[in-house]
Image: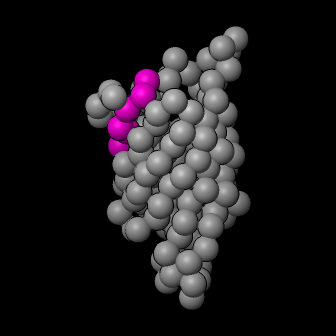
């Protein structure tokens, strides 16, 4: 079961790494990262398997290159990510996630339950 709460995220790609904070609450996700990215999305847990279907939009600021190596753009833009997480996604181990700009590795850690 997904715990409503604040989670740290540490992520890395082909050319760099970053960190951020997300809040998960009742099927909604909101967050930010150190590069100025803004996260908004939804998640749904499958009661039979415990997996979590995650749909996420990341608003990327102008002139911000991505850790995947994607070039910075002159204006803000949105990166859409869809993935499925295992039930123990916040177990402190890196998770590989495919994104339209390239693969990333993300570690989720529950900081505080709501």
Is residue 47 shown in magenta? no
As drawn, the residue found furthest toward the bottom would be 74
Q: Quadrant of residue 83?
A: top right
Q: Is residue 111 left or right of residue 32?
A: left
As drawn, the residue found furthest toward the left would be 112
Start-end of magenta stretch: 3-8
Residue at left offset 70%, top offset 60%: 100
Expressed as whole percent of the image width and height from the top left, the position of residue 54 reads 63, 39
Expressed as whole percent of the image width and height from the top left, the position of residue 108 reads 42, 38
Expressed as whole percent of the image width and height from the top left, the position of residue 105 reads 52, 47
Q: What count of labels does the image hold? A: 0
Is residue 6 shown in magenta? yes
**Most common SS among magenta residues:** strand
Residue 109, above or below 74: above
- Whether residue 35 appears in this view of the structure is yes
Colouring rule applied to residues: one colour
Nearer-the-camera pick, 31 or 105: 31
As drawn, the residue found furthest toward the front would be 26
Nearer-the-camera pick, 3 or 34: 3
Residue 64, above or below 87: below
Q: Is residue 20 left or right of residue 86?
A: left
Nearer-the-camera pick, 83 or 71: 83
Expressed as whole percent of the image width and height from the top left, the position of residue 67 reads 50, 65
Residue 96, above or below 103: above
- Whether residue 97 appears in this view of the structure is no
Residue at left offset 54%, top offset 39%: 28
Residue at left offset 62%, top offset 67%: 78
Please identify the quadrant where the C terminus is shown: top left
């Amino acid at each position: 079961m997904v715990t409503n709460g604040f989670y740290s995220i540490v992520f890395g790609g082909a050319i760099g790494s970053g960190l951020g904070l997300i809040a998960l609450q009742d099927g909604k996700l909101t967050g930010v990262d150190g590069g100025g990215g803004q996260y908004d999305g939804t998640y749904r847990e499958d009661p039979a398997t415990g997996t979590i279907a995650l749909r996420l939009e990341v608003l990327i600021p102008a002139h911000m290159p991505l850790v995947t190596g994607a070039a910075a753009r002159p204006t803000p833009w949105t990166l859409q990510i869809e993935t499925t997480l295992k039930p123990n996604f916040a177990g402190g181990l890196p998770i590989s996630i495919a994104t339209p700009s390239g693969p990333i590795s993300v570690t989720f850690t529950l900081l505080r339950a709501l």
